[in-house]
Amino acid sequence: MTTVTGKLYGVGLGPGDPELLTLAAVRAIAEADVIAYHSARHGRSIARSIAAGHIREDHVEERLMYPLTVETTDHPGGYRGALDDFYEEAAARLAAHLDAGRTVAVLAEGDPLFYGSYQHMHKRLADRYDTTVIPGVTSVSAAAARLGEPLCEAEEVLTIVPGTLPEDELTARLAGTDSAVVMKLGRTFPTVRRALERAGRLEDARYVERAFMAGERTERLADVDPESVPYFSVAVLPSRIDRENPVRELGEVTVVGTGPAGAPWLTPESRGALVNADVLVGYTTYLDRVPVLRPGQIRHGSDNKVESERAEFALDLARRGHRVAVVSGGDPGVFAMATAVLEVACEPAYADVPVRVLPGVTAANAAAAAAGAPLGHDYATISLSDRLKPWDVIADRLRAAAGADLVLALYNPGSRSRTHQVAAARDLLLELRSPDTPVVFARDVGGPEQSVRVLTLKTLDPSEVDMRTLLLIGSSQTRAVERGDGRTIAWTPRRYG
């Protein structure tokens, strides 16, 4: 004997206006024998109120009442345990109707699978019963419609986050995106406001309360009284395209480290600074690594040998009211643009221009991670370029660091116009270290031509080195070990001796 079970519908009702119900939603409600909806302990249900005009007297109603509304409970499993028990019990009630052959429509505000209560029923029932989910207009779309501003356009990225995230996490995500919607405000509003302010986005933020419902309100988020914010409200960062940059008497310069290879290595803070900048300034090769962040930004690329001129240009733009990001590879404070900018910024003409430096993943750290952990103990970082300091100084520092038995991170080891430094450094170090000292040869780390090898000091071939290469020379304690997969890793113990 074949058992015939009922059908389950997850019915999206849209943001609140019954006129925004889809035809499919109305049809599913009409076909249902049972209408189920979640409610708070007071018994009222927003979902039911939206669909009220389509609920008949012969419908069986299942009110799924939450046992608690705040995260305080004496349940042994805590708040999450109490909710899990509730969802299991609610799903069992719906399953009883489905097993009896009844069609069940579970009503959900907005879209059933977007931060909705229905999804908990879906996860517990959809694998056992014939199920159809009917999408609804989300609160995100409703908020954008009520603001009358584009939410995202062209290549812009939209980020949707719950306001319940920790403040630091909110700040990072809001700083690093083009457009955003923050859900679940209410008691989280003060945290969300601080995160927007820390991310430099508060002036752009809009507030929408009860979109397409009674009591609807929209305004600048910065003007909202935190005590007046209900749960059914969202914060919105609309599209930046075609939005004019604010006129400022004085801008700022932010020196941004992009890491060794561009977008995948950007920190959220760095990405946010690049997104917020009016003008990007930098060595053309590094500028090309920065993704297109938003239309309307101006890019000024230049040669790698005009650092002081580039710094002065950026500071002049900031003095005229522009928000400028100076793009640097790796970490801007490691043989990069931070020093050049700060040196010029300390001149009297630029003393009032705000300057920030944001860190990035260094080439040495990236190369070390790719090879294992050769920088696990004390190490020294030395540039082999003698364009800004004499070779005698470099040689003295190599001897001192080698004598102290430090691991060495050698930057700028060679270029088309500098070919002798690697050989000279290798020969010098061979006088002080074992020929079998492990050497990490790292080229284009993070890039499409990445190559990371572990060799020895005696087998280091200077002819293979170029400007995209970084060398890590081990100490007497550094080990090179071939693993079971055939890969050789290098690591330096934290204990010495």
Image: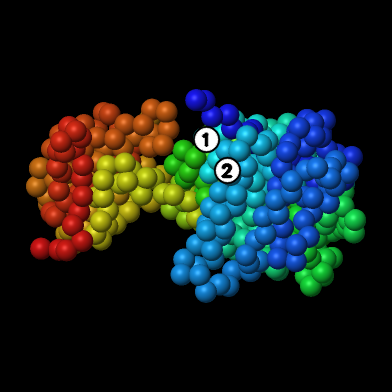
Percent x, y for residue 371? 27, 42
Query: On the image, numbered disc 2 is attached to which residue?
Result: 95
Q: Residue 82 sits in which quadrant?
A: bottom right
Between 93 and 316, the one nearer to me in the picture:
93
Residue kind at label 1, given as amino acid type: Arg
Left or right position of 254 against 393: right
Q: Which label was assigned to residue 100?
A: none
Q: Residues within 10 Å of mark 2 (few under 14, many from 20)?
A: many
The residue mark sitting in front, 1 or 2, is 2
Q: Residues within 10 Å of mark 1 (few under 14, many from 20)?
A: few
Residues 45 and 174: in front is 45
Does the CB distance between marks 1 and 2 fall below 8 Å? yes
x and y, in percent, of residue 180 in the image: 70, 48
SS of the residue under disc 2: helix
Q: Amino acid at mark 2?
A: Ala
Q: Residue at x 63, y 34 (%)?
A: 101
Q: Residue at x 43, y 53 (%)?
A: 334
> Is 146 positioned to the left or the right of 289 in the image?
right
